[in-house]
Amino acid sequence: MQDLGNSITTFDPDIIRLVDSINIGPQSTVSELIEDFNNKYIRQEGHVNRYYNLQAPTKNLGITKKFYWKPGAYDTIKDILWYQGEMHKKANTLEKVVQRVQDNSNWRLRTIKNELYAIESVLVSFRQRGVIMQDNTDDAVEAWEIIRNHLIHQYENSNGAFHITIEEHLSDTDNDDLLDYYINISYLYDDIYMEYKHHNSDHRIAEIFMPGEGHLTVKIPLSRLLNLTLLASNDLTKLNMSDILCSRQNNRRWFYKIGGNYESYDGIEHPYISKTTGHWNQNGYTDHDFKYVCVGNMETEIRGCLKSLDFISLTIFFDRIMTHYDTNTGPLNRINESYHGEPSFLEGNEEYYNIIPKTSTSNCRYYHHLDEMIGDEARSDSYCTKWCTIKDKCDLYISKTRTLSKEEVERIALEQATINAARRIQ
């Protein structure tokens, strides 16, 4: 289960250290665009990306405190165009040199032009407004106090619907440099009942019980929230909707990620939570307790709540993700992976079984988990004992729960001791 340390009410992030580590303030908007451009088109020492030999070995673009290009920008662009036109490559004929430029120039140059236009539009806007790049430590501290007070107010008025914690995001180096802080808003669930209905119908076909506990969590980088707050002149009601991006929409400048986990009996999966940590691995979902969550068609409503930092209203949509499943959706896991065998809460429900066929005992997904149980474990702790109505027809369950003779008990104990000894040697 998720660690609920570093509560928003007791933990104070080091804002000064954060400002020293990354761009905070108006310059961050254009700095992120320039960083993306440099990483894409300029060969970075010790770093290779998908553009490979089309990256130019040239100087990175940079800007001055008054938001003009630093000297050397024009030479950098010339070098980039040279490499994007593949002029650095050898060719058997002069015609081949021209042909390569002709084949690739349209879309490549159009993309570069649009990216530079986006950067220069921001630079021109900042110059016209007289904005000067400066140390924004005091502004960031003030913005954090506004954010913190809002989050605490949300938490105190949520009636326990969620918890808010702050997580340090450190580098993997020996120095443990601070990369950012993450604000985690976690909604906890246990022993949930999932309603199964037809799409746009109030008729409940079944109510599926999923014993266990878990959470859905929104993760927001503090640096991103600080920057958007400063750009909105510390008015949290005026955050720009276009900046409220999920990590799926923008892997570099995301505002939020949604992840979660639900621990139940082996083999039971929540329909909207990924089975594995690798589902969105490229977006950072590597933690077993923070797996990818499918939000279905509620992305717009969720983004609206996050734009307003309204985590109380977000409860409505997260509760629906956890407790509702309709026949029109195609989530990550099938509905019959939410239970094993023929559980008591589906007993006699022919309407449900006409949609989702029954599973024979020989094809039960719990079979190999049950097979690994020893002693009285199957009789006392198995899913079968507590919920399955066809366990008396299951040869494996019957075998696992029958009364053992004294000789069998001793043999099993000896086998287990041998296995344990072998593991210790390894």
Image: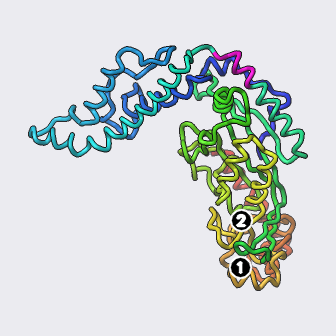
> Quadrant location of the C terminus?
top right
Which of the numbered marks, if any, corresponds to residue 369? 2
Q: Which amino acid does label 1 sit on?
A: Thr
Q: What's drawn in magenta, residue-wise?
A: 136-143
As measured in the structure, the alpha-carbon distance from the residue carrying label 2 to the one carrying label 1 is: 13 Å
Which residue is drawn at the image coordinates 28% and 31% (left, top)? 81
Across and down, in percent, residue 246 comes to: 61, 45
Q: Can residue 360 be seen in this view?
A: no
What amino acid type is highlighted by mark number 2? Answer: His
Q: Is 29 in front, or is 249? A: 29
Q: Name which quarter of the figure residue 218 lies in.
A: top right
SS majority, magenta? helix
Tell me where residue 125 appears, x and y as whole percent: 51, 25
Label 2 crowding class (10 Å Cα cut-off): few <14, some 14-19, many 20+?
A: some
- Answer above or below: position of 104 versus 142: below
Does residue 138 show up? yes
The secondary element bearing badge 2 is classed as helix
Q: Vertical placement of 412 versus 25: above or below?
A: below
